[in-house]
Image (cartoon, grey):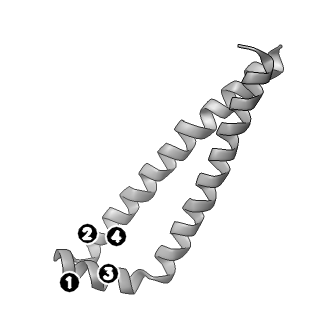
Amino acid sequence: MERERIIFFRNFFFCAFIIGLVFALFYLAATILLWDTAVSLTTHLFKIDEKEFGRLVLLFFIQLRVVIVFFFLVPALALHWMARKR
């Protein structure tokens, strides 16, 4: 690959990582602020208790972390390493 293309993709993946991180922080803040409302809605609509809802939220944040780190940050770091090598 040409150096310019490597730098372009590196910047693309790094920007995607930053945007994903901002959205993850937004989801975290919204979850903390609206916990009681979300629990009451899911209890009413889906008939699950607060403990199960907590497990679902935790699973969501674990999967979000995997996607953000391994789909965006790892390729950005690899491309950064390739760009510095040349």
Residue depth check, mark 3 versus mark 4: number of the one nearer the observer: 3
The residue beneath circle 4 is: 54
Sequence-wise, the earlier of marks 3 and 2 is 3
Judge the density around disc 1: few (<14), some (14-19), many (≥20) Cα neighbours within 10 Å: few
The kind of secondary structure element at disc 3 is helix
Residue 39, label in figure: 3
Sequence-wise, the earlier of marks 2 and 1 is 1
The residue beneath circle 2 is: 52
Q: Distance from label 4 to label 1 (Cα)?
A: 15 Å
Instruction: Left or right? Give the position of 73 relative to 3.
Output: left
Residue depth check, mark 3 versus mark 1: number of the one nearer the observer: 1
Residue that sits furthest to the left in the current view: 47
Sequence-wise, the earlier of marks 3 and 1 is 3
The residue beneath circle 1 is: 44
Instruction: Left or right? Give the position of 15 relative to 57.
Output: right
The amino acid on which the numbered mark 1 sits, given as a three-letter code, is His
Quarter-of-image position of residue 39: bottom left
Judge the density around disc 4: few (<14), some (14-19), many (≥20) Cα neighbours within 10 Å: few
Quarter-of-image position of residue 55: bottom left
The amino acid on which the numbered mark 4 sits, given as a three-letter code, is Gly
Question: Residue 52's x, y, as percent?
Answer: 25, 69
Sequence-wise, the earlier of marks 3 and 4 is 3
* Image quarter hosting the C terminus: top right
Circles 2 and 4, Cβ within 8 Å, touching? The answer is: yes
Residue 23, label in figure: none
Residue depth check, mark 2 versus mark 1: number of the one nearer the observer: 1
